[in-house]
Amino acid sequence: MLAPTRRAFLPWDCFGRIRPQSSCIPDPRSRKPAMSERFFIEHPPTAAEVTFDEAESQHLAKVMRANAGDIVIGFDGRGIEYQIELTTVGKKKVVGTVRNQAEVSREAARHLTLAVALPKGDRQRWLVEKCVELGVARLIPLLTKRGVAQPVEKAIERLRRAVIEASKQCERNHLMVVEEGQSLAELLVSRPAASFLLHPSGETIHHDAILPASEVLAIIGPEGGFTDEEVAAAAEHGCQVVSLGPRILRVETAALAMATLVTALPRP
């Protein structure tokens, strides 16, 4: 009769995260599972105890099939990462104890705010996911005269949930902020010195305009473009009207190109 096969466990680093390896040696003494997914902690731990919300609890219990004694990595969206040992696993409520914690920042060198006239449908979620991965700090749905999508409350909540899911995947510990919708006039009331409105009529942007800044605002219009009045208003408020080249870009393409340009630069 064959001996029962033990479940293979991956080696962990000093913080409890799995080291990527092509093979590993099972450790019969360990109860730590090969669980590389991260989980969001909506409320800070109380007396070292963590209670996951219903969505995360269901994912742990039903999808990951977690058990008491398993070790998972959690993050609170404010920069803290936790190693958590699960103590109670229910279908709608999972509780654990914090075994270790550390402040781990994976933020970009500059605080980038993207004000974007959102595209329609699934392109919104895709845009949000990529902004999170690139390190955008804040996303403001922009209300413009030619906008095609209205940032209603229900849509904003969906995008905020998408931020959490993307942060889990890309190992970002600070959640990108998704603001309520703002008009261009509201946006221009208080803006950083390094503010750029993207428009085909502008000069091609150069990284020299961004390098000295620690905070950057990039304003991206709808598929139909900004009106002449909107471009003039931004220029009157001190925004630099710039272009990303001679081609007409989709909203999400322009947003991600600008995000890549800003977040890839070294610290000022």
Image: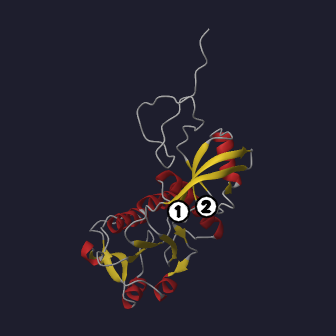
Q: Which numbered disc flags the more N-terminal residue, 1 or 2?
A: 1
Residue at figure coordinates x 30%, y 68% from the top left = 266
Q: What residue lies at 38% left-to-right and 91% top-to-bottom?
A: 236
- Between 201 and 185, the one nearer to me in the picture: 185
Residue 23 is left or right of residue 167, and the answer is: left
Query: Residue 107 at x, y = what percent?
Result: 43, 64
**SS at badge 2:** helix
Amino acid carrying label 1: it is: Lys
- Quadrant where the image shows the C terminus: bottom left
Give the residue type that dot 2 points to.
Arg
- Give the structural element (helix, strand or loop) at label 1: loop
Residue at (58, 70) in percent of width and height: 151
Residue density around tag 1, few if under 14, some if 14–19, many if 20 or more, within 10 Å: few
- Colour scheme in the image? secondary structure
Q: Please, which residue is most extreme toward the front here?
A: 29
Which numbered dot is residue 158? 2
Image location of residue 145, percent across then percent down: 50, 79
In this orientation, does residue 206 appear? no
Quadrant where the N terminus is found in the figure = top right
Q: Where is residue 251 in the image (x, y as percent from the top left)?
A: 42, 66
Q: Disc 1 to disc 2, how far (Cα)?
A: 13 Å
User: Residue 232 bears which disc, if any?
Assistant: none
Q: Which of marks 1 and 2 is in front?
A: 2
Q: Residue at x 55, y 66 (%)?
A: 78
Question: Viewed as shown, does residue 241 lie left or right of 7?
Answer: left
Answer whether residue 100 is visible to the viewer in this image.
yes
Disc 1: which residue: 120
Marks 1/2 in contact by CB < 8 Å: the verdict is no
